Image: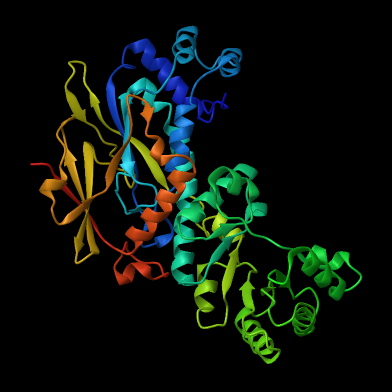
Amino acid sequence: MPASSALHTDRYELTMLDAALRDGTADRRCIFEVFGRRLSGGRRFGVVAGTGRLLSLIRDFRFGHEELRFLRDEHIVDAHTIDYLEDYRFTGTISGYREGELYFPGSPVLTVEGTFAEAVILETLVLSVLNHDSAVATAAARMSIAAGDRPLAEMGSRRAGESSAVAAARAAYIAGFTATSNLEAGRTWGIPTMGTAAHAWTLLHDCEEDAFRAQLDALGTDTTLLVDTYDIRHGVETAVRLAGPRLGGVRLDSGDLPTVAAEVRAQLDELGATGTRITVTSDLDEFAIAALAASPVDAYGVGTSVVTGSGVPTAGMVYKLVARQDAAGGWVPVAKASTDKSSRGGRKTAFRVLDAGTATRETIVVSDGFDAVATADEHPDARALQVEMARGGDIDAAHEGTAGVEAARGHHQRVREELPVRGLALSKSDPAIPSVYVDLE
């Protein structure tokens, strides 16, 4: 039986539930939306990631004996609420942007419909997943843009929590990375894995030559040798002498990378190893990758920067109630009015307006009613952005597992081509396209 995700939540979600069961508002139908008021870090677009993971976690959001015992022992909720949670299962509807989709300020990334009781307690889990994974995917997409056709490997597991590392590898792969060093990510999500040897391997041996010879014996000449433990020039000479001109690759993990890469390429060519690839690592981010665009580099390995969102560790999304039933059963749009933290009430339907295949704006249609929504037929020049992911609590399995990851990766590659040229720049600026709210007529 899968582990429960039910306690991956903040206490106040359950205290609100407790109070709502007491005053009779727990069964009011509600619509919650996930969106970002702005793009974190002055970035020009965001990438939705984590949706497939989230849907599986919502399926497993059930309160078993251990979870209920903890709530009871800690006096977090009363006995009536314990009884409610014992039978809890999300039975509502979830819709939203497909995983891998681009988003902008105000984009209704996820819409959760259900009773207040069943929807409110999902808030922390929803935001934990989407804020982390979307931040990583956004950073990864920027690195992928900077890298162009050169492959990127994610290798940041040692810079993140063990579970976050697996989620980060997944998000990076969706956004354009080609492999990960994390074996659990490979097993769980079907991501190609890579890795050969670290400096410890060279230091283990009496000399660099012994280390290289042993690696070549074990992995063959197509392996990649780490040549900067000692003297790089000597390391390259030794690598080619032992492996021959068909050596697969060398890795550089230190130094002034543009200069060193050029010197190593020249040396490899002089030694006849014209097909030997150069991979660079060493604290790369999107700006360092962009700076290497003119250098003779064949591949990149990125660690700390990608798993931490390259300085922006959260997407800054929020989960807000935007519509609810009143006491008489009618629908009421609701919104937060706090300074700098306001929201817009009503159900949202989103479309990306395209001109010759290039995005020009995000149109967000706002409805005061529950069932009244804008349709794709009413926006023939645009692409509808939301899809249904769960109905009656039943999760659409197409978004989950390895198939869901591959679908998200493919979708991201397609929609990224819609970005206007200004959206590809790495500098801080306004969003690549504006978000325009219109009321449903």
Residue located at (55% from left, 17% from top): 64
Looking at this view, is 299 or 231 the one in front? Answer: 299
Position of residue 229 relative to residue 154, above or below, is: below
378 left or right, relative to 395: left
Q: Residue furthest left?
A: 441
Position of residue 260 relative to residue 253, above or below, is: below
Residue located at (28% from left, 39% from top): 337
221 left or right, relative to 188: right
Position of residue 143 relative to residue 182, above or below, is: below
User: In this orientation, does residue 175 appear?
Assistant: yes
* Snapshot quadrant of residue 41: bottom left
Looking at this view, is 146 or 422 the one in front? Answer: 146
Q: Residue furthest bottom?
A: 270
User: In this orientation, does residue 39 appear?
Assistant: no
Residue located at (13% from left, 44% from top): 439
Position of the C terminus by quadrant: top left
Residue 95 in percent (x, y) is at 31, 37
| Count of numbered circles on the image | 0
Position of the N terminus by quadrant: top right
> By what rule are the colours in the image chosen?
rainbow
422 left or right, relative to 307: left
Residue 230 in percent (x, y) is at 81, 77
Residue located at (45% from left, 30% from top): 58
Looking at this view, is 394 or 436 the one in front? Answer: 394
Residue 328 in percent (x, y) is at 17, 15
Looking at this view, is 13 or 241 the one in front? Answer: 241
